[in-house]
Image (cartoon, rainbow, N blue to C red):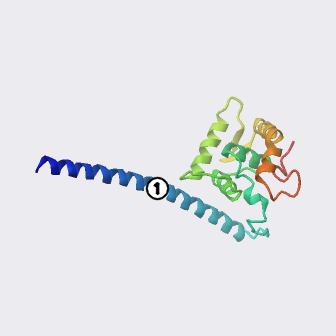
Amino acid sequence: MDDQIKKAYEATLRDLEARCTDTQRQLAAMQAKMKQLHQTAQTIARLIAEGSGQQMSLVQNPDAHRYHAFSVRWAILCLLTETSQPFSVQEIADALLAGGIRTEATNFPNNVSSVLSQMRSKPEPEVATADGKWIISDTGRSAWNHIRDKHGNRLRRKFSPWAETPDALTSGASK
């Protein structure tokens, strides 16, 4: 084979490999988005199946956007502080997705699990496990109260236009 032809083929091969890599990245991003949409749809279907009796209007429901301005850690702290009920990783992930948290994670429950593990491994753990489910610790409750007190008003004004009361972003959070 002629050197000039060989070089042309090699250049073509490099270009094709680069295009394949770029397409692979785009596909991974679209798959992650599809997975997130499916998880949200499953959460909504589960709520409907449970007969929760709540109206499911995402446009008028401020809880549908509750966590969209939060990090995963902040959203977990907020969710677990508002209830004494323990949650599984999947239940936490579903609640955060239903609350509008923004993520590009391919497997959001894995991301939640990782954050929970980090929160548990701190010198003063923010969360603990009980019967395989997650609960908030006193340290975690204190951390959320500090975050809420320091940032609550700014987040409420900036990200929660549906709020009807001053405490709509943090309603139910204990002080």
Q: In front here: 89 or 5?
A: 5
Q: Please give the name of the residue rendered at 63% of the width and 66% of the height, measured from the top-left corner.
A: 41
Farthest-out residue, front: 4
Disc 1, SS: helix
Q: Residues within 10 Å of mark 1 (few under 14, many from 20)?
A: few
> In x, y percent, where is residue 54?
79, 68
- Vertical arrangement, residue 96 with respect to residue 142, above or below: below
Q: Is residue 57 left or right of residue 72?
A: right
Q: Quadrant of residue 128?
A: top right
Residue 171 visible here? yes
Q: Which quadrant of the figure contains the C terminus? A: top right
Report the residue marked by disc 1: 26
Q: Please give the name of the residue rendered at 68% of the width and 45% of the height, measured from the top-left corner.
A: 71
Amino acid residing under circle 1:
Gln
Q: Is residue 151 left or right of residue 122?
A: right
Q: Quadrant of residue 140?
A: top right
> In x, y percent, where is residue 63?
77, 58
Q: Is residue 139 left or right of residue 101?
A: right
